[in-house]
Amino acid sequence: MQKKVLVIEDSSTSMKLITKLVQQALLIPVCASSLTAARHMFGHSNPEEYLCAVVDYNLPDAPNGEAIDFTIESFIPTIVVTGRLDDDTREHILSKDVVDYIPKENAQVYDYLSRLLARLDKNKDIGVLVVDDSRVGRASMASLLRLHNFQTFEADSAQQGLAILHERPNIQLVVTDYHMPDMNGTEFVAELRKSMTKERLAIIGVSAGNSSLLSARFLKSGANDFLHKPFCQEEFLVRINQNVEYIENVEAIRRAANSDYLTGLPNRRHFFYSVNHVTRNQPNHQVIALIDLDHFKKINDTYGHDAGDKVLKDVAKILASQFSDVYVSRFGGEEFCIYLPDINPIEAIERLEQLRESIQSRNIKFQQQVLKVTTSIGVTTIGRKNLEAMLATADSLLYQAKSDGRNRIVHDHNVS
């Protein structure tokens, strides 16, 4: 369900801009130009429907941030925007439990607001672990993280932190203090880096004192970042978001490098990388299937390449659904490949026959047309250790399936 954003702003120019940013984030803006109007609009609403509120600090009927108190008391995470740039206003705003405040000083801050709205929605699925032997220190950092919708976990020792990380695979960021009872922060970071890279888990070291050597020690031990205590609330949250975005950006690059752009299936390069790792363990049984769509060129020539793309996407969905437990790839063009390790050859042939029937019976809707497609499959069940040799055999069997009339499976003599 699309979440709503309550926007309380008396400037029509700012209201239009914020509304546009909310819509670009695929959220629903609920707009009010005064505190009175906001109270009326929100009177019968469910706070759970709202992702957050964007509130102007100075309104005609709420000149000193009274609207902020209203949204916080209504249990809506609150982002404050203000044209006031003085320190007193800033301190007054940050004394409240706000998500963040954004001064209206240039266009760039609205870009920050746009990214912040997107983050608040994404953060609900992201875990952050705070490791600190000080209960006050843990609580302070955890409360800030919860304001940004992170799933927050706390540990008072390195060993407890390791146990939580083992139990919670969605944790993408660890914030760790230097002083702990069982090992210090740099030792803890080094321990984490034995199994988790900077691209898998971001780590921010924190510690009191002004020693620049300690920050260097954290970074050399494998931390992504470091903050001195006491830190500025705004800097803490900006660093948190930047490190989480780093993890996400690396993952996006990895997906782009490993996936076929059209179907989303693993590409040929990633298929070879993954399967070669499996074959090193020499599975007892190995099955390779090469799958080619019949008369695919005719679909492109008759209905256009958009129709061909639709067929490829639909077939890829069937493959991903029926073979989610093994290795599937788009090899290129209309050709796909499946690798099934540690499987009885007869069972593998049965599963591939189900696939052939599913593709044959699929009605693929494109514009006003219903397209049909069949597939030919070549399968080798002789578990050679050499992947390239198995693929060559499967390719030969695929060619035979085409020659024998298409829409069929041809396998080697290993299956009776």
Image: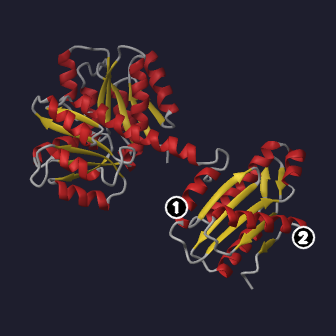
For image coordinates 63% across by 60% down, the residue present is: 328
Lower position in the chain sequence, tag 2 or tag 1: 1
- When asked about the image quadrant of residue 142, the answer is top left
Is disc 2 surrounded by few (<14), some (14 to 19) or many (20+) residues within 10 Å? few
Q: Position of residue 55 (x, y in %)?
A: 34, 27
- Of 93 and 329, nearer the camera is 329
Name the secondary structure under disc 2.
loop
In this view, 96 is above or below 45: above
Q: Position of residue 66 (x, y in %)?
A: 24, 26
Chosen colour scheme: secondary structure
Amino acid residing under circle 2 = Asp
In the image, taking residue 116 as reference, residue 154 lies left or right, namely left
- Of 198 and 240, nearer the camera is 198
The Cα atoms of the two marked residues, 2 and 1, are separated by 35 Å
- Of 194 and 36, nearer the camera is 194
Q: Position of residue 129 (x, y in %)?
A: 26, 49
Q: Position of residue 286 (x, y in %)?
A: 62, 73
Is disc 1 surrounded by few (<14), some (14 to 19) or many (20+) residues within 10 Å? few
Which circle marks residue 277 in the picture?
A: 1
Name the secondary structure under disc 1.
helix
Which of the two marks, 2 or 1, is nearer to us in this view?
A: 1
- For residue 306, say whether it is visible: yes
Amino acid residing under circle 1 = His
In this view, 15 is above or below 319: above
For image coordinates 75% across by 47% down, the residue present is: 309
For image coordinates 72% across by 82% down, the residue present is: 415
Q: How many marks?
A: 2
In the image, taking residue 402 as reference, residue 239 lies left or right, namely left
In this view, 86 is above or below 362: above
In the image, taking residue 206 as reference, residue 37 lies left or right, namely right
Name the residue carrying label 2: 404
